[in-house]
Amino acid sequence: MSLRIAPSRARDEVPSATVERLPVYLHALDRLRASGIATVSSADLAERSGVTSAKLRKDLSHLGSFGTRGVGYDVEFLHRSIADWLGVHEPLGVVIVGLGNLGHALATYRGFAPGGFRIVGLVDVDPDVVGTDVPCGEHSLPVRPLADLAEVAASAQIGVIATPGSAAQDACDRLVAAGITHILSFAPRFLAVPSGVQVRAIDLGVELQILAFRQRQAAHEPGAVSA
Amino acid sequence: MSLRIAPSRARDEVPSATVERLPVYLHALDRLRASGIATVSSADLAERSGVTSAKLRKDLSHLGSFGTRGVGYDVEFLHRSIADWLGVHEPLGVVIVGLGNLGHALATYRGFAPGGFRIVGLVDVDPDVVGTDVPCGEHSLPVRPLADLAEVAASAQIGVIATPGSAAQDACDRLVAAGITHILSFAPRFLAVPSGVQVRAIDLGVELQILAFRQRQAAHEPGAVSA
DNA sequence: TAGATTGTTAATCGATTAACAATC
DNA sequence: TAGATTGTTAATCGATTAACAATC
């Protein structure tokens, strides 16, 4: 088991639902590794990831074959295999637009470096914020004015929008103009972008509303469990 | 058109994929209403929501029939219909655990009130933070110590975890012990909960990693578009 | 060998899409 | 009536699940 070669498979063939779960498995493997656990079964890893073991095995089967029947998965090997497949090896540059509370939370978010990211720029419109230094993991970066966005974005591959909703579309347009094609948005608003640009939007209000619906539904159901 | 009655349908029958998109439509309708636009077609509303018109019409068809053939949807009526169906009328109480940057961002998030929420409590472990007042929309709330969580949670139906990952499971356990059954978690870690409790987890690192994969994939593709 | 667990198969389930009849 | 747009149908597509043969 000392010399194992991970079978490669075209990334295009892997279902997107599987791709979206791989980072979750990777994270769970991170923690197993930190605990010094060397081997894990699909049932155990699945439970730690919040999925069923069948789904986990099916997901992994799209990338290749990483386990040993009757034994399970070597934590180190599986971790490296998924990390390699995702391409975590060389970090992508991230620029954050908007440094209010949310932007600060994102900038100081631990766990970006292990995920294959490097924050390379911080931008805001507020003159009171521009110029201040924000700690980003090990290093620290100055907040630069919005006018410098194009310059800052030159060394970034991913843009993060953490502005108020009213400023989000403008921030988005500027990122796109600067050549950024992949954007993570926390603005409570749908962003219009040209084709070829991908936006992944997380709306806190929407997330809460989905949860709230389920809460109300559960509360009105006959077999509702009360504390 | 002055007296229209929305046909009701059992909430259980509606696909979960549809339920997750309804808040997005509601939000788009909010903005249309604010713009003074009275009527909208499925094609227009779909574009403003980032979906196809076929999907939008199919989604709405699960709730009932709200439009007029040849004309479109009455913005006011459709908004009210969806809001009623989701049950936005009487607000749910929200308690936020952890008031670092992320917790503050959530507490000051505008757009909770229109979504049918009322923040009823803020809790943190840090003695420096406990006792300070945090503005939540129109009112303002004091941060209370973790020991008071059970008391604070008594008037809440939803819990939000915005603590560091290391404290998340403990926060979760305490919320569950206090009778909270629906939790929104921003901790980078899978939370174990008893059955009957629902956790909706948003992991910033995971979201970024999914986006990063797509960026790397697009960059390596032959027909990649470069700015 | 006996027990355990993977990787894969085949069936089921749910979501999306395109097309169009109904109807304003 | 002619043009526009909904609500619904049926076909397609993708994801999940259960079961088990392969194999350590």
Image (cartoon, coloured by chain):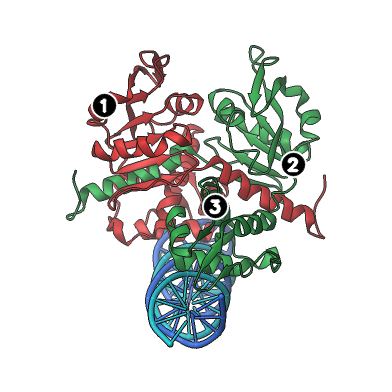
Chain colours: A red, B green, C blue, D cyan
Residue A218 in the image, given as x and y percentages of width and height? 74, 54
**Are there few (<14), some (14-19), or many (20+) residues within 10 Å of tag 1?**
many
Q: Residue at x 30, y 59 (%)?
A: A12
Do the residues marked 1 and 3 share a common chain? no
> For mark 1, what is the residue?
A152
User: Which of label 1 and label 3 is nearer to you?
Assistant: 3
Residue B98 in the image, given as x and y percentages of width and height? 62, 26
In the rendered structure, the residue with mark 2 lies on which chain?
Answer: B
- Can residue B6 be seen here? The reply is yes
Do the residues marked 2 and 3 share a common chain? yes
Q: Please, is residue A17 above or below residue B35 in the view?
A: below
Q: Please, is residue A68 above or below residue A132 in the view?
A: below
- Residue type at mark 1 is Val
> For mark 2, what is the residue?
B157
Quarter-wise, where is residue C2 in the image? bottom right
In the rendered structure, the residue with mark 1 lies on which chain?
Answer: A
- Residue type at mark 3 is Leu
Q: Please, is residue A145 above or below residue B21 in the view?
A: above
